[in-house]
Each structure stands twice: as C-alpha cells, then as structure tokens.
Image (cartoon, rainbow, N blue to C red):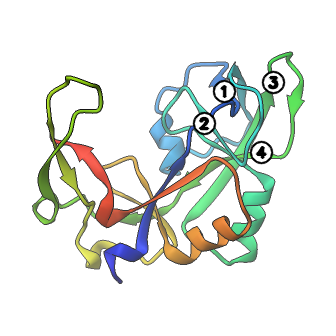
Amino acid sequence: MEFDELYVMSDALMHGALHLCPRNDIADPFAFLRAETLPSVPVVLEYSSGGKPRDAIGTEVIGVVAYSGRVIQILRDGGVTGWATYPLDIHGKSGEKIEGYHGFAVTGRCGPIDNARSSLEPRPPRVPGGPNVQRWIGLYFAPETWDGSDIFMPEDWGCVFVVEPVKKALEKAKVKNFEFTRLTEFERLQL
C-alpha cells in the first residue's frame, strides 16, 4: 500500500448543490458516519440551501451525508468494501420528497493519524493581508492498523479514506459533488 494511492473523499460543496438539515437533533452524528449507530427508521432531512440534488448531498451536521442510488450501485457493482447505508426521508425546498438517496456510513477502519509522518509547512494567507499559517501536509497512519477495506476511516478522525480504484470508478461514472484529495497532499491546520 502506498499513501499516494489513498484519498480523502468528501463533498465538493458545488455551487448551487442542494444542502440539507436534519429535522430532529442527532445526538452523535459521527456515530452515523462511523456506522456505530445505523438507524432502522429513516432520518428526516429537510431543505437548507441550494437547489439541485447531486450524487453527494451534504448536511448542516458533519457526519450525516446522503449518496445517490447511482453511487451506491457503483459501490455494490464494484464489490467495494467498508461501507453501509441507512434510510433517509428527504424533503426539498417546497417540501416535496426527493427519492433515491441513502445515508452513508463507513465500517472500514485504520489506526490513528500519525502526525510524526506529516510535515509542518508555512502556507500563504487565504485572505489578502492575512498571516501565513502553519499547516500539516499529509495524512498517515500505521499501515498494519488498516483493516484492508476499500473505504475506511481513522479511529480518531472524521475523514473518509478510499483506495484509488474507488476514486477512479466514481470519476469514470462522472458522479457530481465529490472531491478526492491524495492523503500525501492533504493539508490541515496545525492544532
């Protein structure tokens, strides 16, 4: 396994893409993403902003994400491991039902992020006149802690990792509103 063949998979936050909000409070949304709690009754999501449903629909609650049936079928057809789904009840801007989406959860795991393998580098300001910031470059973990799943998460962090064949399959299908960043190139703030 090479770290430059692994990617963080995330919502691309496309302009105009539908964004949702859970109708009810969710006590621990990361439990959904980490497949520690898989609801048996649909989680109700309502319009928050945007308009057009894409293949990935983000929500105002980190840890709750909706994937289209098309994405789920690509994963199933490819025999992709390390994921599960749960039911959703989605309502658009006018209250209309939006069908064909599933809550997405990650069952695959690896050990904690190892900051000792990342480099700490200065980066230019993101706003004019702002200060340079120090950023960690790269996400690494001890390879022997990875369970070998195609989709997985570190035990101590909320990012979803995928192997290169998953990225390529989704890109080949031209799915909308997904973003992939190589683990070796991923930047994060110094904490």
Q: Earlier in the sequence, mark 4 or mark 3?
A: 3
Number of the label disc, if any, that sits on residue 20: 1
From what the image shows, is residue 161 above or below residue 23? below
Q: Secondary structure at mark 4?
A: strand
Q: Which residue is mark 3?
A: 92
Residue 135: give x, y in percent of width and height. 18, 46
Q: On the rendered image, what quadrant is the C terminus found in?
A: top left
Q: CA distance from mark 4 to mark 1?
A: 12 Å
Q: Residue at x 44, y 78 (%)?
A: 148
Q: Is label 1 in contact with label 2 (beta carbons under 8 Å)?
A: yes
Q: Earlier in the sequence, mark 1 or mark 2?
A: 1
Q: Which residue is mark 2?
A: 58
Q: Is 33 positioned to the left or the right of 125 in the image?
A: right
Q: Residue furthest bottom?
A: 1
From what the image shows, is residue 116 above or below residue 44? below
Observer-side mark, 4 or 2, equals 2
Q: Residue at x 48, y 73 (%)?
A: 163
Residue 137: give x, y in percent of width and height. 22, 56
**Figure quadrant of residue 126:** top left
Number of the label disc, if any, that sits on residue 101: 4
